[in-house]
Amino acid sequence: MNLEPESKYRYEQNRKFLVFAGALGVVILLSIACMAVYGFYVIPRQAAQRNNQQATLVAQNLKVNQALTARANAPTSTTTPAPFFQYTIDMYGLNLELPMGWIIQEANRRPEPPGIESLAMGHDCADYIVTNPEGSARLTIYPPCEASEGMPIVCPSDMVSIADSGTDKVIGRYFDDGRGAYIYTQAFTGTSSPNGQDALSCYDNPILAIDGAFIRIEFQYVGIDAGKEAMLKLIDQIVLSIKKR
């Protein structure tokens, strides 16, 4: 088709306008489609995810609150955990009972000293360390290795009697600031104190006489104060379970 220059120019302009309008229309349609997809698919999915996350957080918070409530309402005493197991220190022939999960280890093994210091045991010496799984309790047992002497002294004022071991003897526990530990010792009644009154006396080298075996025992605690008394009662129970085989 032959067009005049002016008509040809108008035709080209109209064609370009139609192409631009068509492209613009396509862009608009695509935008509407994207908005529809976002509105009908993305937004509901995001809302569902938010709801699921919120529900998960609520459930987690509920579990945490239930756990905290159960812990707060649980008995705090650790004086009679069950079960116990019996352990034997073969070298010294000693039996003791420990809560399940506690660990006892031999330490500082060494030859028995010769000469007049020897107790003529005929075997090496060693110490024994008992710890709880949390690492807050450390009970150290020092069986005899050499001869020693001790003079009777008035027992510390904070000593607590944990058990009678005879008509005139008790087993006591007191805190030694210098060692940062609770010391277990044999105590004797009927000794006059400086003020003239009868009082318990202890040896200045604290020992326990258990079925003819002399043992030094000390206990260190690094747990929370709220659990100290219950832990001390449990340690008392362990100490009282030590017997000669």
Image (cartoon, helix red, strand yellow):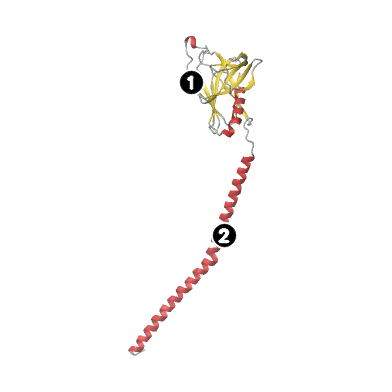
Q: Is residue 173 left or right of residue 33?
A: right
Q: Residue at x 54, y 60 (%)?
A: 46
Q: Rounded to the nearest whole Å, what is the CA distance between mark 2 and mark 1? A: 66 Å
Name the residue beneath numbered marker 1. 109
Q: Which mark is residue 48?
A: 2
Badge 1 element: strand
Q: Residue 210, can we see it?
A: no
Which residue is located at x 39 percent, y 82 percent? 15
Residue sticking out furthest to the front: 195
| Snapshot quadrant of residue 67 | top right
- Judged from this view, the residue extending furthest toward the top is 116
Q: Position of residue 229 (x, y in %)?
A: 60, 30
Give whichever of discs 2 and 1 has the lower sequence position.
Answer: 2
Which x, y percent locates residue 231?
59, 30
Badge 2: few (under 14), some or many (20 or more) residues near its Cα, within 10 Å?
few
Mark 2 is on which residue type?
A: Ala
Q: Dot 2: what SS?
A: helix
Query: Callout 1 environment at 10 Å: few (<14), some (14 to 19), or many (20+)?
Result: few
Q: Is residue 11 found left or right of 229 in the rendered image?
A: left
Amino acid beneath label 1 = Arg
Is residue 60 positioned above or below 100 on the image?
A: below
Position above or below: 85 against 43: above
Task: Indicate the quadrant where residue 3 lies.
Answer: bottom left
User: Which residue is most to the right?
Assistant: 167
Q: Is residue 28 visible?
A: yes
